[in-house]
Amino acid sequence: MGGQSENHDANDPLVRAARRGAERDKRGAAESEPSVIRRLAQIGVLGWVIVTPTLLGVFIGRWLDRVTHSQLFWTAPLLLIGFALGVWSAWKWVEKA
């Protein structure tokens, strides 16, 4: 008779949720929420992931404008392309994390 009670408990959603919570607690701090410092570091990395290609686009654009004697012909589009590439890279990085 005790076996039927245990089988019934295994199908109970509340019992399953409690067991999952206990298993999660057993895994420990290694898989817990990241600390505030870690979150701030992630935000900093995201900033650099966006800013670096943007600035690279500006520098390459300014160089091309000096070489071709144009004003902002290359700088403006390369700035936008660099920014778009940075945002796309950040998006992919966040999806993986």
Image (cartoon, grey):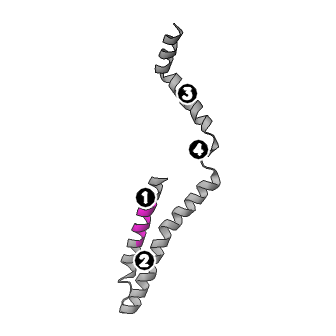
Report the residue marked by disc 3: 19
Residue 81, by quadrant, is: bottom left
Q: Amino acid at mark 3?
A: Arg
SS for dot 1: helix
Q: Residue at x 43, y 77 (%)?
A: 57
For disc 4, the marked residue is 31
Residue 79: x percent and y percent?
A: 41, 75
* Foreground tag (2 vs 1): 1
Q: Secondary structure at mark 3?
A: helix
The numbered mark, 2 or 1, whose residue comes first in the sequence reads 2
Q: CA distance from mark 3 to mark 1?
A: 34 Å
Sequence order check: which comes first, mark 2 or mark 4?
A: 4
Where is 88 relative to 62, above or below?
above
Q: Nearer the viewer, residue 39 or 7?
A: 7
Indicate whether residue 85 is drawn in magenta. Answer: yes
**How far is mark 1 from mark 4, CA to CA?**
22 Å
Label 2: state its secondary structure: helix
Q: Amino acid at mark 4?
A: Glu
Q: Is residue 66 above or below residue 8?
A: below
Image disc number at residue 92 = 1
Q: Are marks 1 and 4 in contact (CB under 8 Å)?
A: no
Residue at the image position 49 percent from the left and 66 percent from the top = 49
Measuring from the top left, give residue 86's x and y in whole percent: 44, 67
Q: Which residue is mark 2?
A: 57
Write the residue at 46% across / 61% down: 90
Q: Of marks 3 and 1, which one's residue comes earlier in the chain?
A: 3
Residue 12 or 83: which is nearer the viewer?
12
Magenta stretch?
82-91
Q: Position of residue 95 (x, y in %)?
A: 44, 53
